[in-house]
Amino acid sequence: MAAMYSTRQLLAVCVVALSFYLSHGRVNPSFKIKAVNLGGWLVTEGWIKPSLFDGITNKDFLDGTGLQFKSVTVGKYLCAEAGGGNIIVANRTSASGWETFSLWRINETNFNFRVFNKQFAGLDTNGNGIDVVAVSSTPGRSETFEIVRNSNDASRVRIKASNGFFLQAKTEELVTADYAGDSKWGDDDPSVFVMTIAGGLQGEFQVTNGYGPKLAPKVMRDHWRTFIVEDDFKFISQNGINAVRIPVGWWIASDPTPPQPYVGGSLKALDNAFLWAQNYGLQVVIDLHAAPGSQNGWEHSSSRDGSQEWGQTDENIRQTVDVIDFLTARYAKSPSLYAVELMNEPRAPGASLDSMTKYYKAGYDAVRKHSSTAYVVMSNRLSSDDPRELFPLASGLTGSVIDVHYYNLFSDEFNSMSVQQNIDFINTNRSAQLNYVTTSNGPLTFVGEWVAEWTVQGATKEDYQRFAEAQLEVFGRATFGWAYWTLKNVNNHWSLEWMIKNGYIKI
Ligand SMILES: *[C@@H]1O[C@H](CO)[C@@H](O)[C@H](O)[C@H]1NC(C)=O
Ligand SMILES: *[C@@H]1O[C@H](CO)[C@@H](O)[C@H](O)[C@H]1NC(C)=O
Ligand SMILES: *[C@@H]1O[C@H](CO)[C@@H](O)[C@H](O)[C@H]1NC(C)=O
C-alpha cells in the first residue's frame, strides 16, 4: 500500500489526520466516552466492599478511628486541653473535637492518639514522666499506648502507657499514667473508661495497615485478582460502555515495593486492565485518585486520619508529577490509553488554587512528554464556588478536560427532594451547571462521577429508571463524556453491573 504513495503524500495525510485527531475533540467531538469507574479496586473504599476488612483483628481500631473516653470515676471525658499543645484533662461533660483521639495504629493492640491540633498524646518526659500531655508532633515510644478491652463489655477499656502503668483520671484536671495492676472493671476504678467510637475511615491505608505486613500482601492481591476480572470488561463492552475510569493511588508508581503500609501488586492489576481493555476495544482513563498526603482528607484518597496535606510543599507536588510521568510512560504505547486524570477531587481550601495550577501545569507537561494524544483531565476543586477557575490554565492546553462530579447527595438541599424534584434538578440545575462549564473554546467537559442514587426512600424501579435516564440525557451533553460511579458495589444502585443486569439502566 505505502509504495503507491510518495513519502510527502503520506506525511500530508498524517498531518491532516493528526490535526483532525487533536482538534476534533475540542468543539463537537464525534466520539465521547460512556464510561464506568472501577471504584474500590486499586484504591480501597470500605463501603464498596466491606468484607475486605473482615479478617482484621480489632477492625474497629483502624487508622483514623476517633475514640472518646469517659472516666467512670469522674464521669467526664478526656480532653486535649486547648485542642493540643497542653495537658490532657478529664473535665468535659460532652465530647466533640478536642475530646476525640484519632488512632494511628501500630498493631492490633498498640496505638498513638492524635489530638485535634495534630499533636500526639504521650507522657510528659520533660516533667515527672507520668502526667499525660499532648505536645509531641511526632509519635515515639512515650506516645504509644495499649488499649485493653474488658472481655465482657467491649466499650469499657483501660489504657496502658509505655511506662507499664495504666492511665487514671485522678481528678478532673489530673490525668496520669501511674495506676498499677489489674482491674475488676468497676465504676470505682479510675483507670477504667467508657469508650465511644466517633467515626473512622476505611481506605487503603486502613486496610493495609490493619492487616499488617504479614497478612496484607495476600489479602490485597486476592482482592485485586478477583474483584475485577477480564469478564467484567467483556460485560461492559457488550452493554454500551466504551471506556473505564480507573482510580489508582500514588504508591502504584513504586510497585513492587511501595512504602509501608502499602502493598505491591496493584501495578500488575493495572497492566491487566490495559490488556483486557485492548481485547474488548475499551478506552482507559487513568485517574490518580489518591495523591501523596491526601488531597481531600477522605478515605478514597487514602488519608491516614482525615488529614489533608497534599500540595503543601514543592517536593510533594514534584512527587505527584513523578507518578503521572511514570504512569503515562508505561501506558503511552497502549491503544487503550485515552486520558490521564491528574488528580481526583482536590478539596478547597486545603488544596489551594495556586498549588493546583502549579501541579496541573507540570502534570500536563509530564503527560505530553510521553503522549501527544492522551487527553489530560483536571478535576475541579470541591468546595470552590467558581467552576471555571481552571479555565485560564486549561484553555491554553490542547486536549485538556475539566472533570465535574454530579451527585444528588452529600448536601442538605437534596434531603427533602421527591423523585420528581430530583429529576427536575438534573434537567434544570445540573443542565445549567454543565452548560456553564461547556464552552466552545475552553476545555472539554467530563462528568467523571455520577450515580442513579438519591436520598429518596422507597422509590420504585421505574423512578430509578427515570432518574438514570434523565442523567444519561443531560450528562450525555458533556463534550468529553461521562463515567458512572461505579461498576461493583454491595450497595446495588451504586453498582452499574447490578443496575444493568436488573434492568434499571440501559445504555
Ligand atoms: C478543664 O481544666 C483545665 C485545666 O485546669 C481548665 O483550663 C479548663 O478551663 C477546664 N475546663 C472545664 C470545662 O472545666
Ligand atoms: C505491638 O506493638 C508494641 C509496641 O511496639 C509491641 O510491644 C507489641 O509486642 C506488639 N504486639 C503485637 C501483637 O505485635
Ligand atoms: C434550580 O434551578 C431553579 C431555576 O433556576 C431555581 O429556581 C432553583 O432554586 C434551583 N434549585 C436548587 C435546589 O438549587
Image (cartoon, helix red, strand yellow):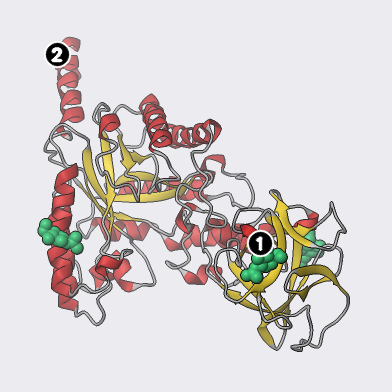
Place of residue 336 in the rendered image (x, y in percent of width and height, measured from the top left): 31, 41
Looking at the picture, tell me which residue is in the foreground, 475 or 164: 164
Local packing at callout 2 (Cα closer than 10 Å; few below 14, some 14-19, many 20+) is few
Is residue 84 rendered to the left or right of residue 319? right
Quadrant observed for ligand 1 in the rendered image: bottom right
Residue of label 2: 9
Label 1 element class: helix
Quarter of the image holding residue 437?
A: top left
Sequence-wise first label, 1 or 2: 2
Which disc is residue 198 wearing? none
Place of residue 341 in the rendered image (x, y in percent of width and height, measured from the top left): 36, 41
Residue type pointed to by label 1: Glu
Quarter of the image holding residue 421?
A: bottom left
Residue of label 1: 81
Q: Is label 1 within 8 A of ligand 1 (CB to nearest ligand atom)?
A: yes
Query: In percent of the image, x 67 and y 57: which residue is there?
Result: 213
How many numbered circles does the render carry?
A: 2
Q: CA distance from mark 1 to mark 2?
A: 77 Å
Residue type pointed to by label 2: Gln
Q: Is residue 425 visible?
A: yes
Is residue 410 rendered to the left or right of residue 151? left
Query: In percent of the image, x 50 and y 49: which residue is there?
Result: 308
Place of residue 145 in the rendered image (x, y in percent of width and height, measured from the top left): 75, 65
